[in-house]
Image: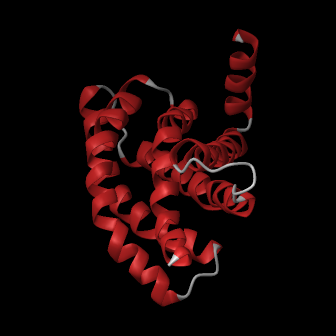
Amino acid sequence: MAGLWRGYVRLAQVYPFRTQVGTTGVLFLVGDAIAQIGVERRTFQTYDYARTARMSAVGLCWVGPVLRTWLVTLERVVVTTGPSAALKKMFLDQALMAPFFLGAFYPVVGLSRWDSWEDIKQLVKKEYLSTLVNNYKLWPAVQLANFYFVPLNLRLLVMNIVALGWNTYLSWRANSQTEDSSTS
């Protein structure tokens, strides 16, 4: 196990963008699988493999690149170190990135399903505010610790590990409206 960790850290140092974006795609896949099997109690026959592929693609093609770029940008904007720098980064992250990210997340997922613009607007209207409120219950503390204790090339991994539960929640929220409307 220690060898796997060392290998991952080395990849994150040598190929930071590819490693972190790839990890995000894999963990979005796992998060959706947990949402379907653990939360929605789907069976092998009712499991939506296309949904898992879409969520993984969202993680790989949008979430990973956006968050990696954001983390690098924060490093350039907040050049000091120590507790005050971590606090500034956390504030910027939660004041700027969280509202933007969640405001764009639901449309990205909707587009990946080929939803109509009207359906996407309804999804955002239904889910955005409660998701943002729940975001503020979890992510400020995670990000404060992440910005203070974790080097840049491992921050997205920390976010991805915590996000395994968060992605399960997001996948469930983003897909529950579609499944509710398809069963009625």
Left/right placement of residue 5 relative to residue 85 reads right
Look at the image and name its color scheme.
secondary structure
Left/right placement of residue 45 relative to residue 68 reads right
- Viewer-side residue, 68 vs 141: 141
Provide residue 44's location: percent of width, then percent of height: 74, 49
Left/right placement of residue 71 relative to residue 182 reads left
Provide residue 38's location: percent of width, then percent of height: 56, 41
Badge count: 0
In the image, what residue occupies the spot 45% across and 49% down?
169
Provide residue 158's location: percent of width, then percent of height: 51, 32
In this picture, is 2 found above or below 101? above
Q: In which quarter of the image is residue 115?
A: bottom right
Q: Residue furthest top?
A: 2
Provide residue 103's location: percent of width, then percent of height: 40, 68
- Viewer-side residue, 9 vs 74: 9
Left/right placement of residue 103 relative to residue 94 reads right
- Viewer-side residue, 61 vs 50: 50
In this picture, is 140 found above or below 127? above
In the image, what residue occupies the spot 37% across and 39% down?
79
- Viewer-side residue, 139 vs 95: 139
Q: Quadrant of the N terminus?
A: top right
